Image (cartoon, rainbow, N blue to C red):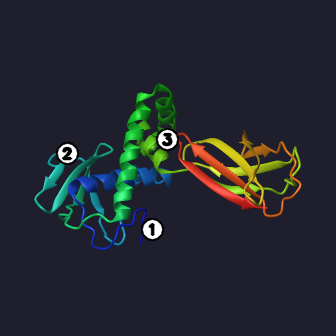
């Protein structure tokens, strides 16, 4: 059985517009997980445990070529990456969205707004377009990459304090990843009582972001280092390391 890349609760029923939303979401997830949907002879997109899936692609068929829309209550035709895709028609939705589903929809709506605004800015448009064109086989666009970037905040994977002993000049090294690019990394050092020792920006240094302490701290007992990272859409991730 294939590993699901999107899970929906049991009993959830999708409208046609929500089905299209799911297809687009899966395009984003495929980009993030480096899955080439276009390379599949049959496009199986598993949504577990709903078991909604695209059954097949129609190739060189004069009857279905270019067809898009719903046929009765049985099939849905859609154009995906220039090919006609046949899917099982969704049932009519009757239940109200859960708070988690509402939050997901709101997040995606915000991502759509960000994607459109990014294309309106020549600088960000070029950045996302370059990333999309770097792997043309995936069929991505600048808009798709921008939306994916908004939906995924940076991840702080490591805070290395082995060279920090509370002295000016000591080094703190941080590893941060992002699906597109990390914009800023900042470091804040606090005493045990929460008072500020110092704070400032870390500098990118290859695979790490390095912060050089500027002040001496006489007591590190209970102190903590707070690292914050942002990406191009200003998603913020925070992680704390206790000394």
**Residue at figure coordinates x 23%, y 67% from the top left:** 95
Label 3 to label 1, Cα distance in Å? Answer: 24 Å
- In the displayed structure, 219 sits above or below 129; it is below
- The residue beneath circle 1 is 3
Image position of 103 (left or right of 203): left
Which residue is outermost to the top?
Answer: 122
Which quadrant would residue 144 be assigned to in this image?
top left
Residue 94: x %, y % from top left = 19, 66
Label 2 to label 1, Cα distance in Å? Answer: 31 Å
Which residue is outermost to the left?
Answer: 72
Label ID, residue 65: 2
**Residue at figure coordinates x 84%, y 59% from the top left:** 220
**Residue at figure coordinates x 37%, y 70% from the top left:** 48
Which quadrant would residue 199 be assigned to in this image?
top right
- Mark 1 falls on what kind of element? loop
Q: Closer to the N terminus: mark 2 or mark 1? A: 1
- Mark 2 falls on what kind of element? loop
Label ID, residue 135: 3
């Amino acid at each position: 059985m294939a590993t699901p890349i999107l899970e929906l609760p049991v009993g959830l029923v999708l409208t046609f517009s929500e089905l299209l939303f799911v297809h687009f979401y899966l395009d984003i997830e495929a980009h993030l997980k480096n899955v080439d949907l276009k390379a599949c002879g049959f496009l199986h997109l598993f949504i577990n445990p709903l078991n909604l899936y695209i059954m097949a692609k129609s190739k060189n068929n004069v009857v279905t070529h270019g067809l898009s829309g719903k046929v009765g209550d049985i099939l849905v035709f859609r154009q995906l990456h220039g090919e006609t895709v046949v899917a099982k028609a969704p049932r009519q939705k009757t239940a109200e969205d859960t708070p988690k589903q509402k939050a997901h929809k709101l997040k995606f709506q915000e991502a759509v707004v960000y994607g459109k605004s990014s294309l309106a800015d020549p600088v960000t448009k070029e950045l996302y377009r370059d990333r999309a064109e770097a792997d043309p086989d995936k069929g991505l666009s600048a808009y798709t990459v921008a939306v994916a970037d908004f939906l995924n905040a940076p991840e702080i994977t490591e805070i290395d304090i082995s060279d920090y002993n509370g002295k000016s000049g000591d080094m703190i090294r941080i590893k941060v990843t992002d699906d597109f690019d990390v914009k800023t990394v900042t470091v804040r050092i606090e005493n045990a009582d929460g008072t500020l020792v110092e704070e400032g920006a870390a500098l990118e240094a290859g695979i790490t972001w390095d912060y050089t302490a500027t002040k001496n701290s006489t007591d590190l007992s209970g102190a903590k280092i707070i690292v914050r990272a942002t990406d191009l859409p200003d998603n913020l991730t925070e992680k704390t390391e206790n000394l």
